[in-house]
Amino acid sequence: MSRTEDTETLQDLGRASVQIVHDLKNQLNGLKLYATFLRRRIEKSDRPSDEQETVVKLINGLDRAATDLSLIVEFGRELELKKQPGFELSKVLRSLCSSFQETEAEVVCQPDADSIQGEFDHSRLTDAFKWLFAGAIKFKQNEEGAGPVSVSLKASDNNAVIEWLGIRQLDHDPFRAFAGGDEIRLSLAKKIVEAHGGSAKLADHKLIVVLPLPGSQTG
């Protein structure tokens, strides 16, 4: 089989996989509908509270599974970016940092004081940063006295460099693991960053994202 045929086979397999996952998500949503109907029936009857709790846990589990499958479907499809100039990186990072601090997450944001702007898809890149924050907090160093996750932003060689410091050493690449919802989101975050001409990796106890700024050369 030629390389071209190999590529076409992989593309066909990818499209088929996305459709299968999409169908599975629809089936889960159907199960959730039935489980929700059952919960309402139980709530109206004199049933033990543990039965209600079991059904609620079932519905929550179906929700999580459907959400993860939606992310896999999105990952398998081609990204369409709607780039706009004037995306203020430090402003978005500070806003997300405050949001996570409100959930009592141990995170400190230290963006560069200077304005760093670029031409990005605001919605998609904000989602990517949100998932990177969540991943960094999940993988925070668990040694005693390790301190909070620290987020930094700086401009270097016509690139914006964002780092989430304080990550424990992992035995796998979280951007390629697809091990649960958090790492599926990290994989999608990396895809969004790369679609903007940037890169994302884990190295030296840091999640590192590099994004091109106006005037930089990307290949």
Image (cartoon, rainbow, N blue to C red):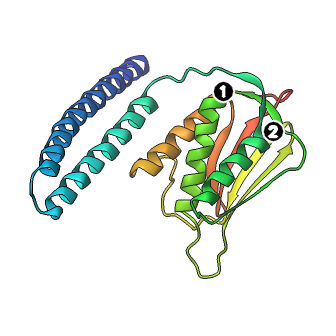
Looking at the rendering, which quadrant does residue 125 occupy? top right
Instruction: Compare residues 174 and 104 and report the one nearer the observer.
Output: 104
Instruction: Report the residue at 69% width, 36% height from top.
Output: 198
Element type at mark 1: loop
Q: Give the residue at the far right of this rendering.
A: 114
Pick the front one: 124 or 179: 124
- Answer yes or no: is residue 177 visible: no
On the image, the x and y values in percent for residue 19 come to: 30, 24
Residue 208, placed above or below residue 121? below
Circle nearer the viewer, 2 or 1? 1
**According to the image, label 1 marks what residue?**
121
Q: Is residue 97 above or below residue 27?
A: below
Which is nearer the N-term, disc 2 or disc 1? Answer: 1
Amino acid type at mark 2: Asn
Kindly identify the residue that appears in the image at 65 percent across and 81 percent down. Answer: 145
Q: Nearer the viewer, residue 181 or 109?
A: 109
Q: Amino acid at mark 1?
A: Asp
Secondary element type, mark 2 = strand
Within-10-Å neighbours for mark 2: few <14, some 14–19, many 20+: many
Q: Which residue sits at x=55%, y=74%?
A: 142
- Determine which quarter of the picture holds residue 164: bottom right
- Pick out the residue farthest to the bottom: 144
Q: Which residue position holds label 2?
A: 159
At a point 83% along the width and 30% down the height, the residue shown is 216
Q: Quadrant of the N terminus?
A: top left
Location of residue 71 by image quarter: top left
Look at the picture and state if 141 lies above or below 40: below
Residue 205: assigned label: none
Is 16 left, or right, of 210 in this rendering?
Answer: left
Residue 191 or residue 124, whichever sits in front: 124
